[in-house]
Amino acid sequence: MAAKRNKGTTFERALEAIFHCYQRSGRAKIHKVDPPIRVIHGPPKRIIPLENYHLDFAGTWTELGGRMIIIEAKWTEDRRLRIGRTGGITENQIANMRSWEKAGAATAAVWGSPLGMKMVSLDMIDERIQATERVSLRWCDAVTVPPGATPEISHDILGCLEGLAF
C-alpha cells in the first residue's frame, strides 16, 4: 500500500514549478525557504527546529526593480483558513508577514484547496480578525488567483500579488 502524501508538500511543489517558470522568463526569483534548524551532536543526536522569519517562500521581483517577495503557502481540504491558530496562518506567521511588509516586501498567503488557488493579503487577515470572534477566512472572501498565460504557469501568482500589493 502506498504511503499517503502530504498535500501541503504537493501544493508547495506546484508553487515551486510556477516560480521556476517566472525565474526562466526573468520575471522573479522566488525559492522555498528551508526552516532553520540547530543540530545537537552526541548521543542522541537531536535536531531542533528554530523560528523561521522568511515564511515558506522568499525572493525578488525582477520586473519591479528587485522588490522582495515573501509568500506563505497554505493548503486546506475545506473552505476555511484558520487565522492565528495551528492548521492555518499562525500568529507568528502573521507577525512575520507584517514585519516584512513594513520593510517594503510584497507579502501574501497563497491558499490552495481542492477548489483551486486563492491569495490572502495581510489587510484581509486584519479585517477578518477585527470583524469577528470566529477567526477564519472563508474561501469566498479570498482573492482568486487567475489562470496563468502559459500551460507551465497554471496560476498567475505574480499578477494577483501585484493587484494586492499596490
Image: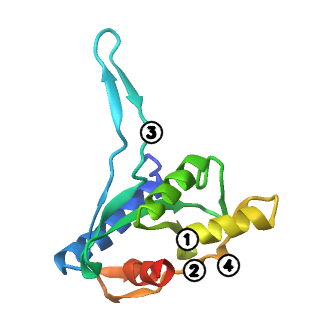
Residue lying at 42% horizontally and 61% vertically, measured from the top left: 103
Instruction: Inspect the image, locate mark 2, and give the three-letter code of the amino acid beneath it.
Output: Val
Tell me whether the residue at label 4 lies in contact with that at label 2, contact meaning CB atoms closer than 8 angstroms: no
Secondary structure under tag 3 reads loop
The mark lying in front, picked from 4 and 2, is 2
Tell me whether the residue at label 3 lies in contact with that at label 4, contact meaning CB atoms closer than 8 angstroms: no
How many numbered circles are shown?
Answer: 4
Q: Can residue 155 be seen at all in this image of the molecule? A: no
Which labelled disc corresponds to residue 140?
4
Q: Can residue 49 be seen at all in this image of the molecule? A: yes
Identify residue for label 3.
Answer: 51
Secondary structure under tag 1 reads loop
Mark 3 surroundings: few (<14), some (14-19) or many (≥20) residues within 10 A: few
Instruction: Inspect the image, locate mark 3, and give the three-letter code of the amino acid beneath it.
Output: Glu
Residue 88 lies in quadrant: bottom right
Identify residue for label 2.
Answer: 143
x, y (%) of residue 3? 43, 46
> Between disc 1 and disc 4, whose residue precedes?
1
The mark lying in front, picked from 1 and 2, is 1
The mark lying in front, picked from 1 and 4, is 1
What is the C-alpha distance between the residues marked 1 and 4? 14 Å
What is the C-alpha distance between the residues marked 1 and 3? 22 Å
Task: Tell whether 130 sits left or right of 37.
Answer: right
> Between disc 3 and disc 4, whose residue precedes?
3
What is the C-alpha distance between the residues marked 2 and 3? 28 Å
